[in-house]
Image (cartoon, rainbow, N blue to C red):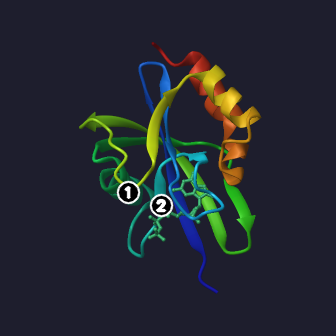
Amino acid sequence: MSSVLVVAGAVFANGKLLIAQRAYPPELAGLWELPGGKVESGETHSDALVRELCEELNVDVSVGEPLSEVVRPREGLELVAIRARIVSGEPRPVEHRALRWVDADDLIALDDAGSVVPNDRAWIPELVADLRVEPR
Ligand SMILES: Nc1nc2c([nH]c(=O)n2[C@H]2C[C@H](O)[C@@H](COP(=O)(O)OP(=O)(O)OP(=O)(O)O)O2)c(=O)[nH]1
């Protein structure tokens, strides 16, 4: 059975994390996620993240270290989050409803409000820890 691998970008700048509000499917629309998408055949995780963030945000990124938590919501689906920084461009919500830069408290509040994509909740402690040490 072929499995689907999704890479999501934890893009940090100026002490904040970039999150994106899904526009589809209906059950996820309105919830916030890390922008990204499926790794295509022949791509590395890094290649896929660079391509997805170019398509979805219209930015070029440099790719850093993955978060340690790999999310496996079901058989055949694996989600990896990778830290990234913008090298050029100003992010625009090409495929999302909106974009937002959040600090640790904002992210915790969104999670408490049930506004984070369920699969991404496992990444929140690590993202919050990063945000607490991220230079402003
Ligand atoms: N991009 C992204 N997808 C996520 C996250 N968490 C999560 O469960 N997903 C799921 C939703 C989708 O089922 C799948 C990725 O789909 P997608 O729609 O973002 O990716 P894509 O552009 O490659 O897909 P497609 O529209 O071509 O089908 O992973 C996340 O943080 N970011």
Give the CA distance from mark 1 to mark 2. Answer: 6 Å
The part of the image, by quadrant, that contains residue 49 is: bottom left
Q: Tag 1's secondary structure?
A: helix
Would residue 38 be found to the left or right of residue 73 on screen? left
The residue shown at (33%, 35%) is: 86
Label 2 CB sits under 8 Å from any ligand 1 atom? yes
The residue at which mark 2 appears reads as 37
Measured from the top left, where is residue 23 in percent x and y? Answer: 50, 56
**90 or 11, nearer to the observer:** 90
Say which element carries label 2: strand
Task: Identify the residue at horizontal 46%, vertical 54% (top origin).
Answer: 36
Disc 1: which residue: 52
For ligand 1, tell me if the residue under mark 1 lies within 8 Å.
Answer: yes
Most extreme residue toward the left is: 88
* Position of the N terminus by quadrant: bottom right
Question: Residue drawn at (53%, 61%), measured in percent from left and top?
Answer: 24
